[in-house]
Image (cartoon, rainbow, N blue to C red):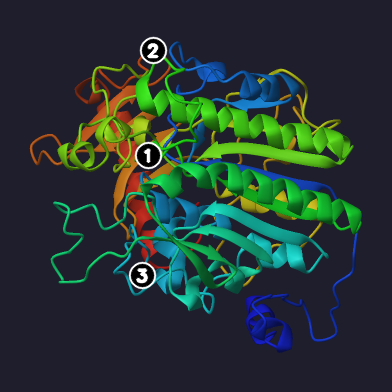
Amino acid sequence: MIENIHKFKTGILASSLLVPAIGAQAQVTPTSAPNIIHILVDDVGYDDISCFGSKDIKTPNLDILASKGMRFTDFYAPHGTSTPSRATLLTGRYAPRVNNGTGLYVLFPSSTTGLDPKQEVTITQLLKTKGYSTALFGKWHLGHLPQFLPTEFGIDKFVGIPYPNDHGPERLGGTGIRPSGVIDPPIPLIRQTEVVKECDNNDLGELPPMFVRESCRFMYDAVKNKTPFYLQYSNIETHTPYFIPRGFEGKSEAGAFGDAVEYMDVCVGIIMDMVKRLKIENNTIIVFTSDNGPLIHKDTELEKCYGRFGETDPSREHVLRGGKYQEKYDGGIRVPCIVVWPGVTPANSECNELVASFDLFDLFAQVADVEVPSDIVIDGRDIMPLIKGEKGAKSPHKAIYGFAPKGGIRSVRYDNWKLVYSNDKNKPFELYNLEVDLGEKNNIADQHPAIVKKISKMGYSANKAIKENKNIN
């Protein structure tokens, strides 16, 4: 299947529309399949929205969304930074597998690599074989060079920025000059493959409503053309700097970050309202997730560059330990997830089974009734019984593993146990019982040597499977 997709590079591909084919005689056939909306937010932690326990940030639209569907309480990214996490979402694979096992770390304006369209098959490419219209509006962060842009991965329409909004020339002491001598340019706004604007900080605050407008227009056009669609709305404002449109500041009890999250919630409400206006609620699955945990440490450089819009409050409490940039503790990789699919997901329900972001690859493929590739290793599994709320449904995973972006085991979540691989040679493991210690505060490894031995072997076995490009048992 992957070979067929990569061979299908005709005149359509030349115009930046990749439409893969399965089999030599395969044709794209329009269907009445359900629409898919994936709201992927940036750096929003597990309890940064009110329906997951936030006390100082109000997200009424997400609360409504959760009341209509299912909250997944044990959903893992499972990488603590943006680039590897987003690669996992699109490919259905742990990040160290991508690009023929070389993996991907956080990409910068000076980076010369990205997600390789010759090595990977994305969910958007598969959806194209079923006649889906596809779009991504917002942040990409899987490569800014032309050969790595969304249009190379089965995404028909792209308007957004290729990397985070704080990778501009004001960084690095205001010089924008990295150790390599490369000077970071202004943040580019890209439409399809063309840079249409070089954004300053004022522009960045006005991009979020633009992305919402683009999303609504895309949905309108797809419905008008009677085409099922996949939309990834990938917000930027909850990543530093926390710039939002004027008039929305100062409303949150959690500073500029709280304002940004509350504005993101406004945008979610607009998208939900558009779905209602188009009368496609009953034929649309909406999934809300975050790419990784929140920024929790102060960064003086960010504050010098962006003032209050770059401030982090380390005293702000989170129920999970740690934040972004790491895969050891749940604060970096366990994130909120909401799924709404009228007639399928039970309303106002909750799932406590282990699920990971790569499972969305399989889920979206099932929604569209498209075959998942069998000639590449896919880590995503069938979570449809969980989505449907079937009695006795269990996670398809024995465990969820936290891997460093380019490989190396960092943690294992097994049942209610969490094993962390420590840097202490004398005490190489930490063990937590998440049933009674959600914040991973009480290391009980010494009390349960048999459990440590069992789970550590699972982790080493999984790490070996990644290196050998084999399925994890």
Residue found at x 67% / y 29%: 269
Q: Secondary structure at mark 3?
A: loop
Type of residue at label 2? Val
Does 193 sit above or below residue 237? below
Q: Quadrant of residue 372?
A: bottom right
Type of residue at label 1? Val
State left or right for residue 210 relative to residue 27. left
The answer to which of 37 and 57 lies nearer the viewer is 57
State left or right for residue 34 relative to residue 139. right
How many neighbours does mark 2 have within 10 angstroms: few (below 14), some (14-19), or many (20 or more)?
A: few
The answer to which of 110 and 471 lies nearer the viewer is 110
Q: Quadrant of residue 391?
A: top right
Type of residue at label 3? Thr
Q: Disc 2 and disc 1: Cα gap in Å?
A: 17 Å
Tell me which label, 1 or 3, sits earlier in the chain: 3
Tell me which label, 3 or 2, sits earlier in the chain: 3
Tell me which label, 2 or 1, sits earlier in the chain: 1
Residue found at x 17% / y 64%: 177
Q: Secondary structure at mark 2?
A: loop
What is the x, y in percent for residue 162?
45, 61
Which residue carries the number 1 mark?
A: 412
Q: Disc 1 and disc 3: Cα gap in Å?
A: 22 Å
